[in-house]
Structures are given as structure tokens and as C-alpha cells.
Image: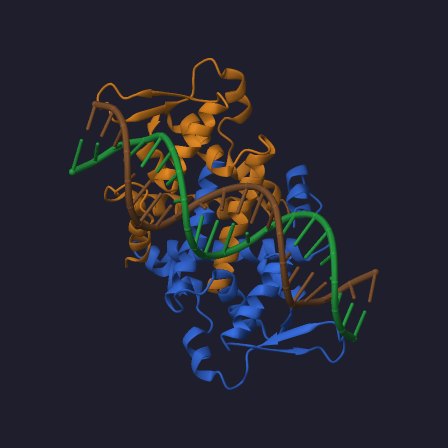
Chain colours: A orange, B blue, C green, D brown
Amino acid sequence: MRVKDLIWLGQRLAEAGQLDVQGLAPGVPTAELLVMYELLEEGPSSITELAERTGYAQSRVSAAVAGLRDREWIGTRRDPADGRRTIAYVPADSGRRASRTRARDAGKEVLGPLLADLPRKRREAIIGALEELHDLLRRQEGGDTLPQGSTEENRRLLRRR
Amino acid sequence: MRVKDLIWLGQRLAEAGQLDVQGLAPGVPTAELLVMYELLEEGPSSITELAERTGYAQSRVSAAVAGLRDREWIGTRRDPADGRRTIAYVPADSGRRASRTRARDAGKEVLGPLLADLPRKRREAIIGALEELHDLLRRQEGGDTLPQGSTEENRRLLRRR
DNA sequence: GAAGATTGAAGACTCAATCTTT
DNA sequence: AAAGATTGAGTCTTCAATCTTC
């Protein structure tokens, strides 16, 4: 596989995921949806945490959180422990919306249909490999605390051998 | 793995590949680089073919080819068999540039360093799974026939291109 | 000083439409 | 009619800078 094919593959995977997620909420920018899922699945978080985990720039996450609050999908409050921090959270009373958007499994919802032709064993092997790769890259990113969602730092990390 | 994680993973893979490729030609837009590699590795191609293979919009590919010609990295000529077609190609005398940019292997150049900590067997299994996935998705794009087990999502995905 | 809100400029892309040429 | 060049509007994003608040 050439590097050009890796780029193509990465973009197709990301795109397939985006289509899945956007199907449930047409017209909402991907960044907002990803922040929403992050909050649903990982719990209340600060802007900086969300920037690190999503890979988006700080300004983008800040805007996404503002957008989600405008939609009344989430709420924000000050961190009592550190008054500078904004904590975004999914309100308890949004049970209906949460149930519509909660915890979509990539293997079942997205990859499954695409790999339908394969024998079960190959399908599971591929999904397993993607999981392993995901966990590995996550660990490499998270290793040292990154100064906000700094793309420069991320790049340097990825390039490191 | 959640859908959000799949999107994240796909974007990281694409980004890692882009960094590799941009390292050799700073300042050149990704679309131009991908068209360039496509021409280097798959040979002379029409605009429409390049658009299909790279996944970019026709207008984007057209502009990318024009850009590459401005850089004098490629040449264009009319298709003698079909006068409407523009054929882009890498001139034979660009041996030096080609050797700098030719055929970068994703497993070695990009994934290898990222997976350095893993035992050889796992590393090869992951790279192999990515190859298989790549070939499978490519075949789904190219084929006008939908895979039989295809679900609604799948159909939507394929229709979007 | 650090978190985050906000803003402005720039880049890269899509989409849709139009025009030219074969 | 089909290929492709070109253009304009719109979207999403980064980056860098600034301002406010703890």
C-alpha cells in the first residue's frame, strides 16, 4: 500500500463515520457532533480536554461548544475547583436525544455493512486491527500533556520515531 | 470502538500520510501531491480518471493539474483517441524529481515508525488488515454493482460520491 | 500565567453552474 | 452529449492574536 492509498483510506474511513453520524443530525457541523459524542461517552469535560481528545483547535472547540449550547443540546458551567475552566456537559433531562445519539459502535454501524461480503473471521480481524491501531495512536498522543490542542505538538508526536 | 473513534482514527491516518508526503514538498497543496503520486504510480491519466481515483471533485483535480503544470512537474496533452480528454503525465526527463518522490510505501514510511513498539507479528497483521480494507473499499467504489449484503448506510455512502 | 472566548485572515475544499471544445 | 476549464458562493477548518477572567 502506497502512502497515497493510506491517505485515501484514512479519508474514506473518516468520511464513512461522518456520514453515519450526520445521518442522525443533518446540518450540524462535524466538530459539534464529535464534541457531543465526546461528552455523551466520556462525560463532562473542559474545553482544553475536548480539544486534546478531538484533535480540534481550541478556538474551534470553543465555538462548537457555544453552538451546542445554542441548540440547547448541552449546558456549561464554571469549574468550582478552577474558576477559569468551562465545563461542558449533557443535561440529565436530555434522555430522549441521548438515546437517539448514544454510543454508536463503529464495528456494527459503519464497518459492518462495508465488510458484509467478507467471512466473519476476516471481518473481525480487520475490526480488531483498527481497534488496536486506534488505542496505540491514542496512547502516543496522550503520552505527555499537550499544550492545548496544538497541532504543532501533535505533528511532532506523530513524526517522532 | 465508537464511531467518533473511527473518525478520529481515519483522520489521524490521513494526516500522518499527508505529513510524510508534505515533508518532501512543503507548501504544495495535498490535492496536487496526490495527483502527482497518482500519475507517478499509475501512469498518464485523464482528469476524470484522476477525480475518481483520488476522490476529489472534478474542479479541484482540474485546478491541481493546472498547478502541477505551472510548477513544471507534469505535462498535459490531448488524447488522440478522444479530443475532449486532457491527459496528464510525468515527463520522462523528470527522473531526478521522480526519484525523490516516487512510490513511498505506507507500511515502511508511515506506519512502521508509528507501530515501532509492537512485536513484528502484530505490526504485520495491522498493516495487512489496512491493505485488505483498502482493496475492499476501492473495489466497492469502482464497481457499479452494489455488494449484495448492502444495507441502507452502505447505499447512502456509495451514492454520495 | 493559564483557560477560554472571540475575531480576522487565509487555505482547501465542495457544489453547482456555465462556457468551450470536440 | 460528454470532458474539462473556470468561476463564485459557501463551509469548515487552522493559525495567530487579543481580550477577559480567574
Q: Is residue A155 left or right of B36 when viewed as pictured?
A: left
Q: Is residue A121 above or below residue B33?
A: above
The outermost residue toward the top is A93
The quadrant the C terminus of chain A occupies is bottom left
Residue at left offset 59%, top offset 53%: B137
**How many numbered circles does the render carry?**
0
Across and down, in percent, residue B20 comes to 39, 63
Q: Is residue D6 above or below residue A45?
A: below
- The answer to whether one can see residue A121 in this image is no
Q: Is residue D3 above or below residue C12?
A: below
Across and down, in percent, residue A3 comes to 46, 63
Q: Is residue C11 left or right of A156 when viewed as pictured?
A: right
Q: Is residue A100 above or below residue D6?
A: above
Q: Nearer the viewer, residue A36 or A42?
A: A36
The outermost residue toward the bottom is B93
Residue at left offset 53%, top offset 69%: B67
Residue at left offset 50%, top offset 26%: A102
Residue at left offset 33%, top offset 24%: A87
Across and down, in percent, residue B70 comes to 52, 74
Across and down, in percent, residue A160 comes to 28, 57
Q: Nearer the viewer, residue A153 or A102?
A: A153
Q: Quadrant of residue A49?
A: top left
- The answer to whether one can see residue B112 in this image is yes
Q: Nearer the viewer, residue A128 or C10?
A: C10
